[in-house]
Amino acid sequence: MKAYASYGAPPEIQAYALAKYSRSSQSMSQSIEELSAQRAEQFLDTFYFQYGHRSIADLAHVTMAIENCSLLAEFYITDESLWDGQSRSTRYQNFHKNNFYIPQSIAKQPELLEPFRNALHTALDNYRCITDMCIRIIEQVTPKPDAMDPTAYKRTVKARAFDVGRYFLPLATHTSVGQITSARVLEQQIVRLNSLNIPELTEIAEAMRMAARNPADNFVAKKIQQACESTKLSIEQTAGLLRELTETGILETPAAPTLVKYTAASSFQSQAAEAARNALRFVPPERAAAPSDIRKIILAAPETDPLEAFAAEIIYLTEPNIRYPQALEYARRASNETKTAAWNAAMELRGEYDELLRVQRIGYMIVFDMLIDFGSLRDFHRHRRCLQIIPQLGLDMGFDAPADIFSLAFGPKGAEIAQEMGLFQEFSDRMEKSIATAAHFPDTTSGLYLAPLGARQRAVFKMDIAEAAYIAELRSKPGGHFSYRHAAWQMAEALTATYPFLKNSVRAVNPFETLDLLNR
């Protein structure tokens, strides 16, 4: 028996080697030694594109960075179930040093550009002001322990203050994303970004495609080149060696030039959802309650009827300002014939290479309807072992009450200090103006870039019991952000209320009982 790791082969050559490995008696190292980028391309053209063996692309993993994109773009970039990566934290980085993304539709119109920039400066002022006031609150609630290093205390206090200050960061704020995905996910990701009709995402999709096709940044290659140039070899010998290293795929090698050939925009997802909605003949109900009167987390019924679940999710996804239980109620009233017609209407538009819609991934036991601030949605969005149905982002779901925010963030004493400082009213005034300013812009997408992270958004998260328990336990721990701690606790409460046998199994932490501002 022998086990060994392999390192150094470019992603597509590695994929070819593993695919060839399954069809050959050679060892993996022998397979890799025989390969070249040209042979890999020929193999992939045949088996991946002609024969449709798409799992081959899962063998090629690409590390990629997308830097200086907006928070809005970051949300869509990371909207993949099979995705691993990191983006900049709003807790550990001071975002007041950041620049902002300005949409081209704004930049080209002077009459819009100035108010847009003014709104960004106001957002930054809100961020700084609220953060500074929160630092003062924390220092009163939790003075520095004698045993704690002053620098560590200052850093921790700032992180906790940023947790509240981030509510005012606009989605135009620059951030960066680092990801490791298979080439298949990368291909799907680029197609999806191209299909969303948001100019920044189209630009990012093309940049990602070219990053996969052009020579990748290779720190090992840089070291090899430096070593070659420092030897006593002649210029001709050095050039020959570098040429040989290039031909073998060590230098000047693209990450996945073949597997991202076909990444044009696809209209199937949006058109199929709209066709299904039209077939349902859905008439929007009157809104049951104002956003401030609705619970954050609702545990809906299990998806035991696939057609009913499909119809409910189509309604939820395409109807603004409706919560999932309302959509589910209508789906239950619709006839099976109507729901079948909706399913078929969507499938009639499906092309040869189109996968089923995300809303057709049905049959989940646990379905959570969420109404949470965008910052927390961004945090929950990182959980990959669940299915996320997220409608188009908007600006009309309000924001959490400041009394709740400061109570959850700093406890009763901190909330009392915040109220005495007039921070409840100041927070509300600033947040209302931020959302109103964003909603004022005629271009909905451009206005969305001004939306603060504190604006609430809707989402449905579907999962099994194990994942629900994992999220509830992980996200409710004392070191986490107070907003998602509260949401995770509500998940645990809803879960154990519906399934009492889980009461002693889900180890969620009550955020009202465990508040440690120096634990992060």
Image (cartoon, rainbow, N blue to C red):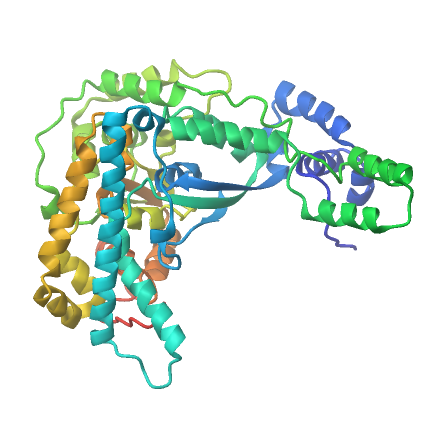
Q: Kindly tell me whether residue 317 is visible in this rendering.
A: no
Q: Position of residue 3 (x, y in %)?
A: 75, 54
| Above or below for 130 versus 433 | below
Q: Residue furthest bottom?
A: 146
**In the displayed structure, does residue 328 sit left or right of residue 366?**
left
Q: Quadrant of residue 404?
A: bottom left
Q: Position of residue 234 (x, y in %)?
A: 91, 42
Q: Residue at x 40, y 79 (%)?
A: 149
Q: Quadrant of the N terminus?
A: bottom right
**In the displayed structure, does residue 360 sit left or right of residue 131?**
right
Q: Position of residue 307 (x, y in %)?
A: 29, 27
Q: Position of residue 455 (x, y in %)?
A: 22, 44
Number of numbered discs overlaid on the protein picture: 0
Q: Quadrant of residue 120?
A: top left
Q: Residue at x 37, y 81 (%)?
A: 148
Q: Quadrant of the C terminus?
A: bottom left
